[in-house]
Image (spheres, grey):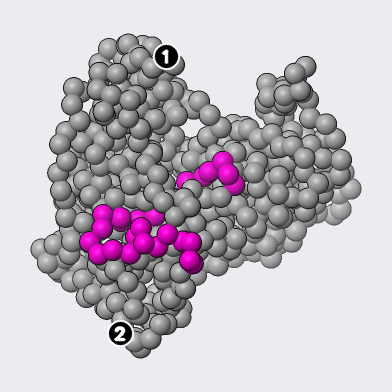
Amino acid sequence: MKDQTPSVRTFDPVHTLVQRACKAHAKRIALCEGDGQISYGELHKTVQAIKADIQASAVVAGSIVAVIAQSSAQAITTALAVWAADCTLMLIDAGLPDERRQAMLKAVPTRAVIRCQAAAGSLIEIVEPSADAGAGVFEKSGSDYAYIAFTSGSTGKPKAIVGSHNGLSQFLVWQRSEFSITPDDRFAQFTNLSFDVWFRDVFTPLISGATVCIPEQRLLGAQAAISFIRENAITAVHVVPSIAGLWVSQQAGEPPIETLRYSFFAGEPLDAGLVTQWTNLFPGSQVVNLYGPTETTLAKHFKRLGTPLAAGIQSVGHPIEGATSFVLAEDGTVCGVGETGEICIATPYGSHGYFADGVLISPFVTGVYAPDPSLAVYRTGDIGRSGLDREIEILGRQDDQIKINGVRIDLGEVKSVMLGFPGVATVFACARTTRFTKTIIAFVESPACAVDQLLGYLRDRLPSVMLPSDVHVLVTLPRLPNGKLDRKRLTELANQPIEFTANTQLDQSRSVIQRLEHVWREVLDRQQVSRTQNFFDMGGNSLSIVVLHEHLQREFNVKIPLVRLFQYSTIDSQVELVRMHAGETTTLRAAHLHDLPSDPRLVHRRSLIASRARRTNQVSVQ
């Protein structure tokens, strides 16, 4: 650990930094989406127009304004306009279940909601504040409250974290400077709106005069992702290791792509094998390993990975400028080299804290770091150790939190929601590592519980990444002599191969069915599959369905729109689907990876430019 946390610098907020880039690079392209482009000059005009509409709707300065959208240029311009109007931004992915979106809106004193709709424009809806919402915390001009981000919480409700303007800008300015981002760079925007990583995905390039390239659809398969990077001459990308692993595993024999300068990995442990595969495909790319919880603002550790690589999981290096870290032993002392303990981070650029019950609660605590008890520290819950070079190596979690596709999930929240289903008495949940990703396995203690109904209940309340891939209902769960659940035994059961009874009645389409079964077994990593059971109920998720899509197209030499797999989600139904699309040739499109699509749509260029609208409590932004 460094001896002293650096003094706090004051940075201009992000919308001011972007406005400065708009003036300096007015004719350069800021945003690319499909065939549409927006220059920095057009970006500035669009943001100002939406800002005027927000102010005309009588939104109070400092208010929380929710933007419900899919990743798009429209979402970016609206986010900048919310900040320019002196309001706090809350981004909500339009693909989340409605109940989840409503829980987010109710978790904080939301004052207005902007729904970005490509075809019909956007609508600003004024929300009547609740008497006990705590709006007074936010509704003040010039506050440092930049955004609301959500993480999984053990109470069953999404956990609201209030991000800082100064902390966000500090990280973006650091990243621009550290990696010499220039107007010639082209960033791929792959991140879902609901994750705070979206801010670095979008605004590191925009404060630098660079170009943000946005895929037109949500789900991003390996072939489409790599093609998008190649065809758009992408020079920088933020990516989660498990997603990158999926991409490169499907690209054997692909010619290398020379344009990529930087690959920023974060969200999960990064293995040397993946780095080697990645750099074989992108030989000119510098791989950077980033680390930092949402509470500390985006990332607070980094390491440039070079050769030779250390074996296994890669270190996250040293703290970035403006942060310091150490490893804390169970007895409260600072660990020595090689000793295992909890990773702690101190920074003056962290978040403002959790918003709950009308007040802000800081995630930072004092009295932890013995050499300086006054130092405010965030205890990450990550277990790690430092090496001789003082670099931090992450070894795992000390609680029930896991990472799936880079998304931090509190298994306590999954369990809490499941316990709300009638007849469920006790729940145990753990992670199971499959061929392509991690999944959640749940065991339910219940005298009678319909799994299909339970899964439907969960789909209405949890994002797809938090849905259990398997639910096992038992009258009594295994317990230890003291009455506690036998967690070791349940974890062992969760990691055993899962079998389903196969339907052996094959018709004249036997060869097609057998080929489909073979593909499903490979993708789901199962010994047997059911012809009539839903793909998602057999352990499929938003990552593996992309793999299934590519395997089916390769196996049967057909072009099938990915969205059709959500409509034809059993083996029996996909027999007909393969027949329907035999001989068709459609263009594969790039798409996003984090969640199931609920309303796929193309975003046309004309929807990117906002126009003035009527000055009422409902203001249309076309």
Q: Is residue 315 above or below residue 90?
A: above
Q: Residues within 10 Å of mark 1 (few under 14, many from 20)?
A: few
Q: Position of residue 413 (x, y in %)?
A: 59, 43
Q: Position of residue 286 (x, y in %)?
A: 26, 36
Q: Is residue 446 above or below residue 76?
A: above
User: Left or right: 602 with respect to 462?
Assistant: left
Q: Earlier in the sequence, mark 1 or mark 2?
A: 1
Return the residue nearer the eye: 22 or 296: 296
Q: Which residue is at 65% across, 47% downward? A: 417
Q: Secondary structure at mark 2?
A: loop
Give, as a three-letter code, the residue at label 2. Arg
The residue that mark 1 highlights is 331
Residue 86: in sight, yes or no? yes
Circle 1 or circle 2, nearest the eye? 1
Q: Which residue is at 26% across, 54% downward? A: 144
Residue that sits furthest to the right in the current view: 505
The residue that mark 2 highlights is 612
What segment carries the magenta color? Answer: 130-156
